Amino acid sequence: MNRQVHLKSRPVGAPSPTNFDIVDAPMPDVSDPESVLRRTRFLSLDPYMRGRMSDGPSYATPVAVGATMCGHTVSEVVESRNPRFSPGDIVAGYDGWQQFAVSNGADLRKLDPALPMSAFLGVLGMPGMTAYVGLLDIGQPQAGETVVVSAASGAVGSVVGQLAKIKGCRAVGVAGSPAKCRYVVDELGFDACVNYKADDFRNDLRNACPDGVDVYFENVGGAVLAAVLRLLNRGARIPLCGLIAEYNATENTPGPNLRPLLVNRVMIKGFIVSDHNDRAPAFLQEMTPLIRDGRIKFREDVVEGLDAAPAAFIGLLEGRNFGKLLVRVS
Ligand SMILES: NC(=O)c1ccc[n+]([C@@H]2O[C@H](COP(=O)([O-])OP(=O)(O)OC[C@H]3O[C@@H](n4cnc5c(N)ncnc54)[C@H](OP(=O)(O)O)[C@@H]3O)[C@@H](O)[C@H]2O)c1
């Protein structure tokens, strides 16, 4: 059987386990002459999936009610009729929340076996690429500038701050607990990290950015954005990557005061990583040695078994993950 997690109903506000259905489906059909059957080794859980659970206006098509939840995967080929793939190959795909998948292989990419396979879902995958494109192409950090990033201990934010350091910037993280902040500074090498849940967050942030903020890599929105806006320098850039604080909102949240954007000629640019696929070769070429040499570190939060995926995903939207959230499916 092929265990799958389906979207059972669309959540209103925060998702709950009742929005998911765990199903034992028949094994996929491998009769196609090119078919590549693979077993999921790792499934990535990412904030964007909250958007796919809703059918409101978006840049992407939602998951249909009753369909398997979508998601990036790293899998092992178990059977192949396609000469490009052999059993045992480790491949990246977009197979979703399920144990097995089949296709003609056009949607698969063989992975470098010298690197940990799970890294291709995080630091060397979509989140890493998001950090790379958003920071370097949109943020355009210059040595000596201050880069602030929210959700700093997470998949995207952790890479943003480490790349900022490599580019000679002051890297300041914002994260949701003292443990996350300690990790960001002590392990990842950021210059500072501020807990946005602390009473004195606004002052702490100001103290961490004595020269103001030149690049704010925006991952959360809400109160964190409002606090950073007050510190922006003239000509600051905001790669607007995500607004996770608002993903479960059922009403419009009161907007921040955008006046600092006007008076400081700030550029704010929304972007979607999939528009920048031409940057993938450069991303992999620059990042691979940094990972291999340990100059960019990464942390993974691995939950065991596909059945744990719904609760883990719900936790992601509440900050319960600590590092790149992954499901070890098999
Ligand atoms: N534009 C794109 O193409 C693109 C691509 C990938 C990701 N993204 C966005 O990048 C952001 C980070 O994604 P990720 O994959 O790196 O996730 P992640 O940081 O590994 O995990 C999500 C983190 O967001 C924080 N968070 C959750 N709820 C929050 C809230 N209500 N207020 C403030 N922070 C909250 C939590 O950290 P704390 O405990 O520190 O709050 C949580 O651990 C998300 O907004 C995501 O949508 C955008």
Image (cartoon, rainbow, N blue to C red):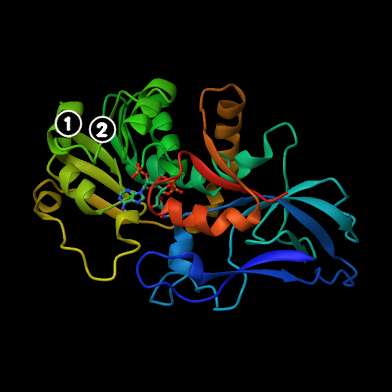
Give the image location of residue 298, x and y in percent. Answer: 52, 32
The answer to whether residue 186 of the structure is visible from this angle is yes
Q: Which residue is mark 1?
A: 204
Asked if ligand 1 lies within 8 A of label 1, the reply is: no
Looking at the image, residue 177 lies above or below residue 305: above
10 Å neighbourhood of mark 1: few (<14), some, or many (≥20)? some
For the residue marked with disc 2, what is the amino acid? Val
Who is closer to the viewer here, 21 or 86?
Answer: 21
Who is closer to the viewer here, 136 or 120?
Answer: 120
From the viewer's perspective, is 183 left or right of 218?
Answer: right
From the viewer's perspective, is 89 left or right of 41?
Answer: right
Q: Which residue is mark 2?
A: 194
Give the image location of residue 43, x and y in percent. Answer: 62, 52
Q: Quadrant of residue 65?
A: bottom right
* Contact between labelled residues 1 and 2, with CB atoms less than 8 Å apart: yes
Residue at image position (39%, 47%) is 319
Q: Earlier in the sequence, mark 2 or mark 1?
A: 2
Residue at image position (40%, 36%) is 153
Q: Quadrant of residue 166?
A: top left
The answer to whether residue 167 of the structure is visible from this angle is no
For the residue marked with disc 1, what is the amino acid? Asp
From the viewer's perspective, is 190 left or right of 66?
Answer: left
Give the image location of residue 233, x and y in percent. Answer: 15, 38
Give the image location of residue 19, x and y in percent. Answer: 49, 71
10 Å neighbourhood of mark 2: few (<14), some, or many (≥20)? many
Residue at image position (19%, 29%) is 209
SS category of the residue bearing label 2: strand
In what quadrant of the picture does the N terminus appear?
bottom right
